[in-house]
Amino acid sequence: MMNAQKNSLRNSILASTVFDRLMPWAAIPSIGLLGCASFVGCQPSSSVPPAKPSETVVATEEPSARSLKDLIDDTLAYNRDRRILSTQRNAAWQVAHGSVAYGLDLPLQVGNQRVSAFEYLFGGGSMRGWQMALGGTNPNTNRPIVKTFVEAGSYEGQGQTHPPLDLPITVDGKTLTLEDWGRSAQYEIPNNTFREYSWTLIALTNLFPDDYEWKAADGKLWTLEPLVAFEAKQDLTSSPCGGMHRAMGLAHAVQYWKRRKLSFTGGWLEAQKKLKETVDIIRRYQNSDGTFSTNYTSRPGTSNDLSTRIGTTGHTLEVLAYALEPEQLREPWMEKSVRRLCEMLQASKNEELECGGLYHGLAGLRIYRERVFGHPDS
């Protein structure tokens, strides 16, 4: 993979590092456990202006007749430009999921204006279920600890877009940076009462890849390996969303360790084994139409509900798109799943969909697109 593509892929991993992954352990007392709850959905907007001639929109020919790359691009463009979240109708957890797929490019309707959701919220904007606050001083940096308070729903998500560590964040009228938030999350790891570290792994392996150990709030030195080992022992079938978020954390950990070109031993080896077992089960339970089991890794299954199939296939595809090697992503079973997800999203383009499943699926398509075909702008 060329350096530009590597950077692009890294850039397509972390909006949820900012929105979702830091939230669970940056403001632990205020976050509710959720699972894959359904709230007000993500509906097509009738007020979206027609696309400019240069913009990509969903073409009129049948999806099966089109190239996979074009099908992915059009699916991503349509759902970005035609499903507009708003501060009036939607909640912060839904924006967090939208950022998973689109990062800085996710639009948000604020009154009569359409702005970058990411820049709006981190620039001090307000929205239902979103609050940031300062929480003392981080002794490792001698800078403020940043806490985020969000309603149940923002606990889940997989990511896109890597903003720079010096990205400004406005908290209580004070300008801080993304790095301050990341270091706060790193410091607060012992206070994770939920005992789910997948978000931690995704954030820290991408935000601070060169940090081998650090001192946390309990005064002890921490490394990533005990977190990796803990996650590798968890039962995915009893975890939220079929364990796909935990699987995504393991995928990030394994890929991170590969990039460091270090031996897989201890917790890292357990994570590698667990991830391979998970991928094998996913493939074994794949449905004949390309969708993945609506029961995830517990047993085979499908559903008559299109939104359910989009959600389960989308969650699963997102993990595979990051976990597998590029040559595996080009195998027929994977191409079939990608095409089928695009077809389902095309079939439901005028329907309101549950935001979590929708954006996880779109995130999977984006990761797949970048790893197989490169970034659209490269």
Image: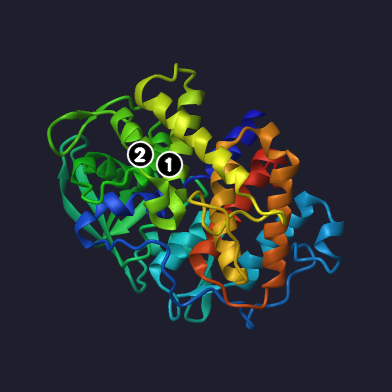
Element type at marker 1? helix
Q: Which mark is residue 327?
A: none
| Left or right placement of residue 27 versus residue 107 in this view | left
Packing grade of label 2 (10 A; few <14, some 14-19, many >=20) is many
* Quarter occupied by the C terminus: top right
Relative image position of residue 162 (x, y in whole percent): 49, 45
- Residue 217 in which image quadrant: top left
Camera-nearest residue between 74 and 140: 74
Distance from disc 2 to disc 1, alpha carbons, whole Å, reads 8 Å
The disc labelled 2 sits on which kind of residue? Glu
Q: Is 255 above or below relative to 113?
A: above
Percent across and percent down for residue 190 are: 19, 41
Give how far across and how far down residue 267 sits, in percent.
35, 27
Residue at 49%, 18% (x, y): give it.
Answer: 261
Total labels drawn: 2
The residue lying toward the viewer, choosing from 176 and 271, is: 271
Q: Which is nearer the eye, 277 or 325? A: 277
On residue 249, the disc is: 1
Q: Is residue 47 at least partly visible in the picture?
A: yes
How does the figure colour the protein chain or chains? rainbow
In the image, residue 285 above or below residue 302: above
CB of mark 2 within 8 Å of CB of mark 1? yes
Q: Position of residue 277 (x, y in %)?
A: 51, 35
The residue that appears at 73% across and 50% down in the rendered structure is 336
Residue at disc 2, secondary structure: helix
Give the residue drawn at x 47%, y 81%. 111
- Residue position marked by numbered label 2 in the rendering: 231
Is 187 on the left-hand or right-hand side of 219?
right
